[in-house]
Image (spheres, coloured by chain):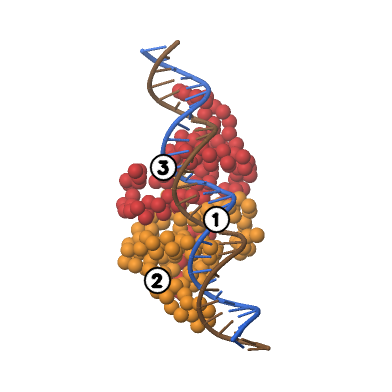
Chain colours: A red, B orange, C blue, D brown
Amino acid sequence: MFHEYHCTIMTKETAASTAQMRKGVLELCILRVLEHGEAYTSDIVAALQAVDLLVVEGTVYPLLTRMKNAETLTYRWAESPSGPPRKYYSMTPKGEKVLNDLEGAWDQFVDSVNSLSNATKI
Amino acid sequence: MFHEYHCTIMTKETAASTAQMRKGVLELCILRVLEHGEAYTSDIVAALQAVDLLVVEGTVYPLLTRMKNAETLTYRWAESPSGPPRKYYSMTPKGEKVLNDLEGAWDQFVDSVNSLSNATKI
DNA sequence: ACATAGTACCCTGCAATACAAAGTACCGTG
DNA sequence: CACGGTACTTTGTATTGCAGGGTACTATGT
């Protein structure tokens, strides 16, 4: 069952493709969220869902671990008002550099895809 | 060995992410190429590489087969001026509908990702 | 006629990873 | 002390981009 009710049109094909589109850009999205300050997983998921980027915790947790291992992120433990302690993630200096690179790659990628709809001739 | 010499900045991390970004948008890109008329695989690969979308034949061939099986595309055999015959692909009516849907999904996706860099607050 | 080179298509195996689902652990409350 | 909620982790599956190798057809040169 798809949770993408808010989309105007969402056929089987489109749903599969949008799922694919998310891949590879999640790292950029997470860094953009953390650009505004530290956050823990539920914050990040909520921020991404708030802009219609549909991700689930099961996807974000492993990605955060990978980014932490790559030293793009770091975290600190912090107590929760109710529940177990949370891992609050924030960018490392290396993470800021990665973010900067990914911004450029993203812009270039969008330009490339969009240039196909006008300029291409075979 | 990466062939992405033309990119201004391409670290290990960026290269991996751009490879991921390509995934899921290739179908849209192929449809955008075929929007201008039929083409065979080498035409398509050349058109994508011309706008810095780096794909290889090994990726495009299976994708074209999947799209043909999904009845998004069809093809006709045509003789080559030199070499074996070629499969010239073109969009089916269903393909035009898929293209239209993917255009909308793509625009929405780009907006979502870009909205993170400004409006997000945690 | 035959060997060679070039072009085009196809298939197999590998690696990465999004996602689902189940499991573990901690905290507060009744 | 049991229970519900929250948070983190792990396991398994399916998808798919990519590399590499294989097959087949055509044209060319000897």
Q: Of A93 and D30, which appears nearest the observer?
A: D30
Question: Residue B115 or B68: which is nearer the viewer?
Answer: B68
What residue sits right under mark 2 in the picture?
Answer: B75
Spatial separation of the CA atoms under disc 2 and disc 1 = 28 Å
Measure the alpha-carbon separation of dots 3 and 2: 40 Å
Badge 3 amino acid? Gln
Say if labels 2 and 1 share a chain.
yes
Residue B111 visible in the snapshot: no
> Circle 2: is it few (<14), some (14-19), or many (20+) Cα within 10 Å?
some
Quick one: label 2 or label 1, which is nearer the N terminus? Answer: 1
Q: Position of residue A25 (x, y in %)?
A: 50, 50
Between the C-alphas of marks 1 and 3, the distance is 24 Å
| Dots 1, 3 in contact, CB < 8 A | no
**Identity, as a three-letter code, of the amino acid under mark 2:** Tyr
Q: Residue D12 appears at what percent x and percent y?
A: 49, 39
Of tags 2 and 1, the one toward the viewer is 2
